[in-house]
């Protein structure tokens, strides 16, 4: 695997950075817990950034890079499903794309709303368009994503000739790439606060104990990123499960530390840290959580 970005990938990231720049500032005061922007969603879709995996010269690695970058924003953007799973389902899938497991269909579904496309996976893969009477919005949910509960599905759904294993592998790649971006942004926000916050006459960031734990968080964040890229390159079910496992395990460790480092500020919504860490809390439980990823990795590796 070549670890350097290609010229095309650099160009795409440069364009994406320019698009994201107006949305870098986190909304805090009088802002909803789940920060979203229709303008940002529209720009990402119309810019074709979620379509890169349809180009064989760009592929799923470029899609994972796009997902990671968008996940760093304080605004929640549906990117992982559309960029990585949608190429399996067809180009004319209505945005946003929501992913649901048959066995866990009662969990809050990210970005689920009327008119969204729902892809449900179990023994097979099926598609349908969500109606208002089939879902219940959850505006009080503490996950910093717009979520809703799927109450029912239509009697007739469109079956897709896609392997559930391949579908789940791409879902896990998306989970890992999204986690990498969220961890990176949360770590940056934490480091910035610790650099400014004074205690005992010097910045908190100068204390060795905090530096050690921040270094561990950086190593975990880097590991999540590279495992996500490896899985995106191979699309191997074992690689994807290991990437998702490390992502969920790292998120569990880091989210706790980040909030502890901020002290009382970390327990309020006056600092934007929650915009990333609360999303991580939902991703930690996706696809059955760490235990399910470990079992999937073992099954894919050793049968």
Image: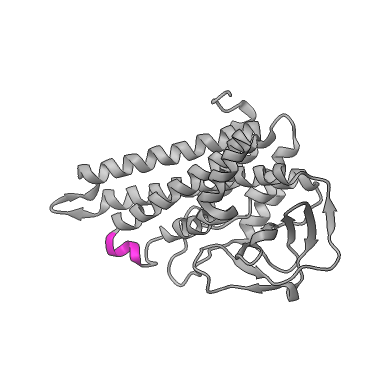
| Residue at (66, 60) in percent of width and height | 103
- The answer to whether residue 244 is above or below residue 272 is above
- The answer to whether residue 266 is magenta is yes
Residue 86 lies, in percent from the top left, at 73, 47
- The answer to whether residue 151 is above or below residue 116 is below
Residue 259 lies, in percent from the top left, at 34, 58
Q: The magenta stretch spans which residues?
A: 263-267
Residue 59 lies, in percent from the top left, at 69, 34
Residue 272 lies, in percent from the top left, at 41, 60
219 left or right of 91 in image: left
- The quadrant the C terminus occupies is top right
- The quadrant the N terminus occupies is top right
- The answer to whether residue 247 is magenta is no
| Residue at (70, 72) in percent of width and height | 151
For the stretch drawn in magenta, the main secondary structure is: helix
| Residue at (73, 69) in percent of width and height | 114
> From where the camera sits, is residue 193 visible?
yes
| Residue at (61, 26) in percent of width and height | 6
Observer-nearest residue: 245 or 251? 245
């Amino acid at each position: 695997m070549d670890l350097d970005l290609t010229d095309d990938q650099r160009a795409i990231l440069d364009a994406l950075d320019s698009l994201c720049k107006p949305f870098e500032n986190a909304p805090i005061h009088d802002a909803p817990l789940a920060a979203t922007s229709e303008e940002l969603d529209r720009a990402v879709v119309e810019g074709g950034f979620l379509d890169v995996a349809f180009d064989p010269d760009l592929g799923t690695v470029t899609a994972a890079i796009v997902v990671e970058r968008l996940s760093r924003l304080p605004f929640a953007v549906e990117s992982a499903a559309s960029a990585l799973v949608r190429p399996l389902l067809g180009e004319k899938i209505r945005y946003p794309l929501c992913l649901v497991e048959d066995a866990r269909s009662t969990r809050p579904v990210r970005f689920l709303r009327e008119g969204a496309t729902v892809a449900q996976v179990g023994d097979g893969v099926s598609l349908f368009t969500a109606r208002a009477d089939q879902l219940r919005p959850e505006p009080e949910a503490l996950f910093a994503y717009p979520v809703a509960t799927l109450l029912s599905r239509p009697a007739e759904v469109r079956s897709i000739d896609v392997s559930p294993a391949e579908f789940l592998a791409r879902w896990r790649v998306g989970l890992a790439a999204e986690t990498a971006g969220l961890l990176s942004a949360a770590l940056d926000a934490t480091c910035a606060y610790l650099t400014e916050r004074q205690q005992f006459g010097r910045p908190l960031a100068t204390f060795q104990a905090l530096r050690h734990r921040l270094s561990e968080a950086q190593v975990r964040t880097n590991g999540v990123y590279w495992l996500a890229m490896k899985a995106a390159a191979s699309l191997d079910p074992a690689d994807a499960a290991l990437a998702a496992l490390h992502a969920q395990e790292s998120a569990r460790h880091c989210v706790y530390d980040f909030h502890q480092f901020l002290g009382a500020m970390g327990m309020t919504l006056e600092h934007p840290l929650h915009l990333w860490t609360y999303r991580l809390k939902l991703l930690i439980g996706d696809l059955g959580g760490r235990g399910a990823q470990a079992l999937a990795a073992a099954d894919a590796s050793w049968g």
